[in-house]
Image (tube, grey):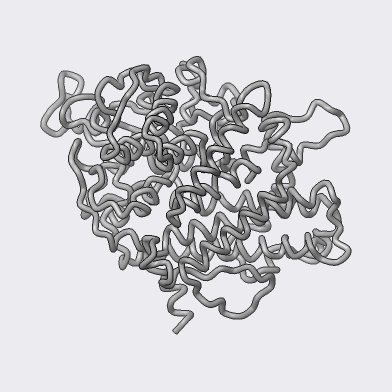
Amino acid sequence: MKIKTFFKNIALIAALSLPFTSCSEWLKVDMEDGIMEDALYNENEGFLIALNGIYTNLNSIYGSFWGMGALDVMAQYYNVPQVGDHPYSVYSGYNYEDSGFDNNSGTIWTNVYNLIANINVLIDHCDAEGSAISDRYYPIVKGEALALRAMLHFDLLRFYGPIYGPDTENQSAVPYLDIPNNKDMVAISTAKEVADKVLRDLTEAARLLENDPIRTEGVLASESDQPNEGNELRYRQYRLNYYAVQGLLARLYMWTGNKTAAYNCVRTLLTEVNNAQDEPVFPWVTRADATNLSTPDRLFSTEVMFALYNTSRESLFDNMFNQTLEGNALTFVGGMSGESSKLSAFYGENSASDYRRRMWEEIIYGGSGSEEGGSTDATTSTYFLKYEDVSVETSYSFRYMIPLMRISEMYLILAECTTDLNEAMSSVNEVRWNRNLTEEISFTEEERLQYIRDEFAREVIGEGQLFYFYKRHAMESIPSGTTAGEDYSMQLSDYVVPLPTTETDNRQ
């Protein structure tokens, strides 16, 4: 696949790797290379290289911690005991005082703020007097940069901030860094102050991205066939495009409790993406692609609104989900069926045809007699295959994709926000129908949130979103990862991750 050429100048981007020592030094390499900050921003290509570097470095943040690993363990997806020697027990047990957790949290914190600092440098150069960026690229580059700054601050708020509400919105949360080349300690903002600035940045990003080519030409998931046209404005699923910005706005409105604004946002978005072109911008996965024997599209990649492009995805899979890890892998407890199977409880009755169940494989390991029916020492687990590198022989478009937002989430936001229960059921059934579940479900108003929660959990596993859903609703009872069909009692305090000591020590 030629998408790699879109993320060009990888050698330079590698020189921009995290962590950085200041908000300007990341752009500097040895003098003999002739690359300095001002020189980089001396032409359009430099702005695009800098923006690509930011997207590339998102992988260090949304990989094994804020993506498919730790954050999903904190949502109790997997069979990880709260105590013991499993490498992820510190996360399933919310042991925030553990040095390992604090070190990893500190690394994420430092990486995020260093990346935000460099986004600010990019934005500042976009608006500098006599800026070299052309009118064609300015709205896209600045719009995406603002959206990136907003997204990172929003996820800092969701992770470290309080459970948002009228009684907590004025509690301290995280700093909002929006001043380039700032050398002073930035004050910690309240949760409401952070949310307001996220809204400001996303609103401006949406305005700048009004002419995003995704609105007229779709995701452009291939190289241009025009000899004089570059690919800088293509592959829009891997950028914070106009629709992804609308999705972030909907998430923000949900976080702050503004369901009317969230409803209006997703209703407008869904109407446009489903009717703007000859076919939907983010079409539902087809049966052929979801059930393909050689390269199954387990990510339902056509539905993804925003994703990372991570060439190390196979390594992430091997370090978290590969069956060779045996007891250290992130798995579902039990096999594919039966009372001890989380898979059966997770997908529910009459779900054998669900495309999402095809992401799993039952493995029996240990015990000398497992092939003859198992032994007392044998262990049955269900392994997660969503990110498995299914084929090294054939190139396929989603091989390095890690989704961060998908269209089904928008339908479920609609279902949660509408005042019309029939519309809520229709939205949930739209998702289920496109997962090959033809039997319509119905629910009462009292049951609505449970049905939405269950469907959302099935949609975003491996994508680091479920913990935030639970936190937003302050759920004190969530499905257990260690016992099929039972609940885990959640302490509300465990939803609020303390700031890392790398930050708090600097403020003493």
| Residue 318: x %, y % from top left | 42, 39
Identify whether 493 is placed above or below 306: below
Say left or right for 67 vs 357.
Answer: right
Quadrant of the image for the C terminus? bottom left
Quadrant of the image for the N terminus? top right
In the picture, residue 83 is in which quadrant?
A: bottom left
Farthest front residue in view: 420
| Residue 434: x %, y % from top left | 45, 22
Residue at 21% across, 48% down: 488
Identify whether 505 is placed above or below 302: below
Determine if residue 339 is in view.
yes
Say left or right for 261 vs 6.
Answer: left
| Residue 376: x %, y % from top left | 11, 31
In the picture, residue 338 is in which quadrant?
A: top left
Determine if residue 402 is in view.
no
| Residue 248: x %, y % from top left | 54, 48
Say left or right for 25 vs 479.
Answer: right
Residue at 60% across, 47% down: 245
Identify whether 92 is placed above or below 506: above
Residue at 68% across, 64% down: 120
How many discs mark residues in the rendered view? 0
Farthest left residue in view: 376
In the picture, residue 201 is in which quadrant?
A: bottom right
Residue sitting nearer the eye, 283 or 262: 262
Farthest bottom residue in view: 508
Identify whether 282 is placed above or below 37: above
Residue sitting nearer the eye, 451 or 56: 451
